[in-house]
Amino acid sequence: MQTLCLSERDNASIEQAARIIRAAGLVAFPTETVYGLGGNALDAAAVMKIFTAKERPVWDPLIVHLVSREMLEPLIANPPAQFDKLFAAFMPGPLTVVLLKSALIPDVVTAGRKSVAVRFPLHPVAQRLIAATGLPLAAPSANRFQRVSPTTAEHVLDDLDGRIDAILDGGSCPIGVESTVLDLTGDVPFILRKGAITLEQLQQALGEVVLADPDGVSYRHGGLPSPGMMSRHYAPRTKLLLVEGREKALAEKAQQVSKQKLGALLPSGWNISAATIFDWGQWRDWAKLASRLYAGLRCLDEQSLDVIIAPLPPEEGLGGAIRERLLKASGLEMDHSALFDC
């Protein structure tokens, strides 16, 4: 299969991408979070192509992307009152909500669960594409399963060239980490995945909101409740070691592994002994660090290194989402000694 590279600046390219999707093909497209791999969410055969292209197991559900309440209504069963508050406050935007689904959504989209994850992307290219298709799009991140998520069209090509029909190039994704996922199917809303919409923002809108316990998640029986809940995900091929976010702790870790080919996801102005450095951005500028996280991991992963080291942000706004992604990328391989270094 030849993967077409289309430009979002050309209206004819948007329509061409829409025709591909309407014909049960797959198109990667930009969102404000990461690039998604879109297919017709109402066509089980098209959805299975997504799993095949990504080498993704079918117990890992997909997010359905929409452009209007009118497109959503036939797909879900009686949304709770909290949804209207969320829609008014955060949609379109980087928030995914898990709701009870209608029979129109094929079970392959939801890993056999009775709930479906839905989102209204803010990115204008995503909105134009969905509107042009007239269809809800099932769209996980446009990368091979468990690999680092793509934030540019070039990242998509690195993973999926020859596996999908087309890429709609819309430049770099501004947020750079996946959407927050909030489950509304229980008595209390709970966050399944952290993102740019924070716990504090959701609590301000809804009142009580809690974080899900990942240790309680079972996915082989009935499927995961949401994408991004595996213990290892968003991962480079190179071993990733983490320390708490202080320059001294990172420098000490660099010294400990200095005999190996070392790379570092390094905040601007920090000094360590590392052969290969990716300038990540100013520490505590969480928006900047989030937007460069996956580009940095991909860049370092291409350098034939033995190990990558990175500092962990605190649980502070978008820093909490970056922290979650780094922990999953490392397979929770944390340098716990740094936690107790005063």
Image (cartoon, rainbow, N blue to C red):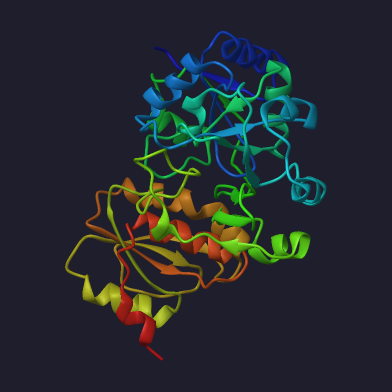
Q: Is residue 305 above or below residue 135?
A: below
- Image x and y of residue 337, in percent: 30, 81
What residue lies at 32% left-to-right and 45% top-to-bottom?
Answer: 302
Q: Is residue 332 above or below residue 139?
A: below
What residue lies at 62% left-to-right and 32% top-to-bottom?
Answer: 101
- Whether residue 321 sits left or right of residue 334 in the image: it is right
Residue sitting at the far right: 88
Depth check, front residue: 18 or 99: 99
Q: Is residue 184 above or below residue 24?
A: below
- Whether residue 212 sits left or right of residue 237 in the image: it is right
Split into 4 quadrants, where in the image is the N terminus? top left
Q: Which image quadrant is residue 71 in?
A: top right
Residue sitting at the far left: 259
- Image x and y of residue 35, in percent: 55, 36
Q: Which image quadrant is residue 259 in?
A: bottom left
Split into 4 quadrants, where in the image is the C terminus? bottom left
Depth check, front residue: 67 or 256: 67
* Labels in figure, total: 0
Q: Which image quadrant is residue 256 in?
A: bottom left
Q: Is residue 221 above or below residue 194?
A: above
Depth check, front residue: 276 or 15: 15
- Image x and y of residue 112, in percent: 46, 31
Depth check, front residue: 225 or 266: 225
